[in-house]
Image (tube, rainbow, N blue to C red):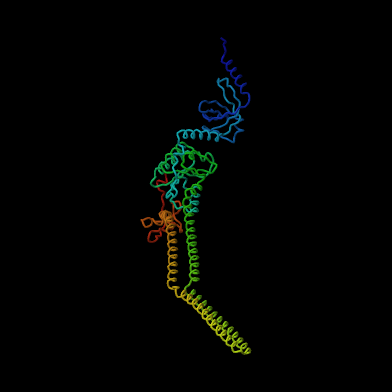
Amino acid sequence: MKKFTVTEITRAVKGLLENTFADNIAVKGEISSFSRSPAGHLYFVLKDQKAQIKCVMFRGMADKNKGYDPKNGDSVEAIGELTVYEAGGNYQLLVKKLDYDSVGLFWQLFEEVKKKLEAEGLFEDELKKPTPYLPKRVAIITSPTGAAIKDFLITMKNDGAVFEVDVWGVPVQGKDAIAPIVSALSKAGAMTDRYDALVLMRGGGSLDDLAVFNEEYVARALAACKVPTISAIGHERDISICDFVADKRVATPTAAASFLGEGYSSAGRELDLLGKRLTNIMNQKVMNANQRLDMLMQSVGSASPKKRVESDRRQLSYLIKSLSGHTLQMTDRKKAKLNELIGIMSRISPKAQIERQKNSINDIDRRLKDALFNKKRSESDRINILLQKVSGFAPDRKAENYKNKLDNLVYRMKSAVKSEVTDNKSRLAPLTAKLEALDPHNILSKGYSFVMLDGKPIKSVFDISLQDELEIRLNDGYINSFVTGKKVSEENDG
């Protein structure tokens, strides 16, 4: 067995350690047992969850590191040499540079809490509660004087949303904000009979500013809410533990207002669209009915009994005139032929021949008369048939048929328009009822009142100042009053 002195062992360890870690090394950990000697040297311990190492930073190096003033609890990165302090028999880090490592510690703690809650199932989609399409009242947990609530209310007004808002004023930064936020979440989150949604909200900031929303207590309180929850913390790039446990995550407070007001915007757009469609349908129905009526009137006009009779009478007159003219022309031609024959006979002389010619003439005259008689009788029969058609045509009965057709068409047109109007009224009724139920003015008849300043509704005690002249609207008139004092409700103080 070899024997060694304490010095020999210590120097052997020193040589082995310093040779192994011959170059500068960087070590991350949390500062504890910090002290500053009268000479300006810094002494502290770096630790993590399982081990620790002593550190010393001599004055010369400390003076070069004045950009950061270390303290207990800080997460840092120390750069230096690993040495053995022989007199104390321990190894230590001779620190040459010390940097604050808040980002590293932040994400370390972030991941620890995230993994823990995720393992418990608090991030599961099955636990997410749906937000109502048309919320009536919403709880806002945020700073009552911050830019976030102002942006929310402005966006809500611009979007035309009419839900009520209760602001639960809490601090939203630092360790002191944990208890007030948890208390507000526990109280407001249980009021399912009052609130349709709950928004945990703050504007943007640094990682340290938003750190409270990564606290396990805050995340668990948000997850335990019975009211549907919305996380609206920071900006689009900011992520918090509360974003994972909330029922809905939106990027900003402004986005939260737009999300909650989307139902009202959609309902308004749908009403406008239905109104336009109803107007177009009515106009088209009326236009079609007018066109059909015009066509019917033209058809009735062209088939008018009076016009038919007049047309037949004109045709009859034409036929009579034509027959008369034809008869006269034929008679004139026969007479001329007879006169010509008589002249010839008078020149021939012989009596027998004259007698033959006379008989012939008589025969011709008889035949002529028969032909004229037959022609006249044929034309007369044709005229009688035409007269029978005219007399058989019943103007009153035809007119009555056309009137019945017209009345039936008008009745069908009115029924179609009435049915279309009834259908569209049925579709509009539910949406109209929803909007009327949400109209703040309807509650005046129930004993409530509106308080306004300069014609604008007052929603918070922070909107008014002492000596402001207020107008209180009741169901049957107005009351003017002056502000002599104001007090924030106990719920908002929480």
Q: Nearer the viewer, residue 9 or 108?
A: 108
Residue 186, relative to residue 292: is it above or below? above
Q: In the picture provided, is 436 more to the left or to the right than 3?
A: left
Is 76 drawn above or below residue 332 in the view shown? above
Locate residue 162, reporting x and y percent. 45, 53
Image quadrant assignment for residue 58: top right
Q: Position of residue 106 (x, y in %)?
A: 53, 35
- Numbered circles on residues, count: 0
Asked whether residue 138 appears in the rendered view, the answer is yes
Q: Position of residue 443 (x, y in %)?
A: 38, 55
- Spot the residue most to the left: 447
Q: Nearer the viewer, residue 250 or 391?
A: 391
Residue 483 appears in the picture as rendered = no
Q: Residue at x 49, y 56 (%)?
A: 273
Counting from the top left corner in percent of width and height, residue 107 is at 53, 35
Q: Nearer the viewer, residue 362 or 38?
A: 362
Report the quarter where the C terminus lies.
Answer: top left
Quadrant of the drawing holding the N terminus: top right
In this view, the residue farthest toward the top is: 1
